[in-house]
Image (cartoon, rainbow, N blue to C red):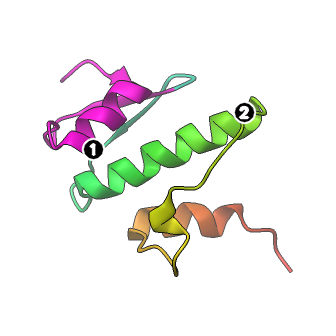
């Protein structure tokens, strides 16, 4: 099994197309992200970006949404939709 790469390095590899489905990303706190059987590299990239965003918000850093997310609703992979649904407060 591959050793996990740091979050920023993993995102850079995924964004550049330099990652394979064997990549493991260290999300911190002993949690690692990887591609599941039904998953894709795009889904892993979305999860990694989400973890980075949550960490930035927790550290009270300035957060700008990427321009491609400002126009309309971004396409989310099913696993990311599931995570976001779980974070929504109940009515």
**x, y percentage for residue 25?**
36, 30
Q: What residue is rendered at 34% in x and 49% in y?
A: 44
Q: Which residues are magenta?
A: 1-27
In this rendered view, identify the residue nearer to me: 72 or 91: 72
Q: What residue is rendered at 35% in x and 48% in y?
A: 45
**With respect to residue 86, does 13 lie above or below?**
above
Q: 25 left or right of 61?
A: left
Which corner quadrant holds the N terminus? top left
Asked if residue 26 lies in the magenta stretch, the reply is yes
Image-quadrant location for residue 21: top left
**x, y percentage for residue 88?**
73, 68
Q: 49 left or right of 10?
A: right
Q: Residues within 10 Å of mark 1 (few under 14, many from 20)?
A: few
Residue holding disc 2: 61
Q: Distance between the Cα atoms at labels 2 and 1?
A: 22 Å
Asked if residue 84 lies in the magenta stretch, the reply is no
Which corner quadrant holds the C terminus? bottom right
Q: 70 left or right of 44?
A: right
Q: What residue is rendered at 75% in x and 29% in y?
A: 59
In the picture as drawn, the residue positioned furthest to the top comes out as 3
In the picture as drawn, the residue positioned furthest to the front comes out as 67
Q: 82 left or right of 2?
A: right
**Label whose residue precedes the other's in the sequence (2 or 1):** 1
Image-quadrant location for residue 68: bottom left
Residue holding disc 1: 15
Q: What residue is rendered at 50% in x and 62% in y?
A: 67
**With respect to residue 36, does 6 lie above or below?**
above
Image-quadrant location for residue 42: bottom left
In this rendered view, identify the residue nearer to me: 73 or 77: 73
Q: Residues within 10 Å of mark 2 (few under 14, many from 20)?
A: few
Q: Secondary structure at mark 1?
A: helix
């Amino acid at each position: 099994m591959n050793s996990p790469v740091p979050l920023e390095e993993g995102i850079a590899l995924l964004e550049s197309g330099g990652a394979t489905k064997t990549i493991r990303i260290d999300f911190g706190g002993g949690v690692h992200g990887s591609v599941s059987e039904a998953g894709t590299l795009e889904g892993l990239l979305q999860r990694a970006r989400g973890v980075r965003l949550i960490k930035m918000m927790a550290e009270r850093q300035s957060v700008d949404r990427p321009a491609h997310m400002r126009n309309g609703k971004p396409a989310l992979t099913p696993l990311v939709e599931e995570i976001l649904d779980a974070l929504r407060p109940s009515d």
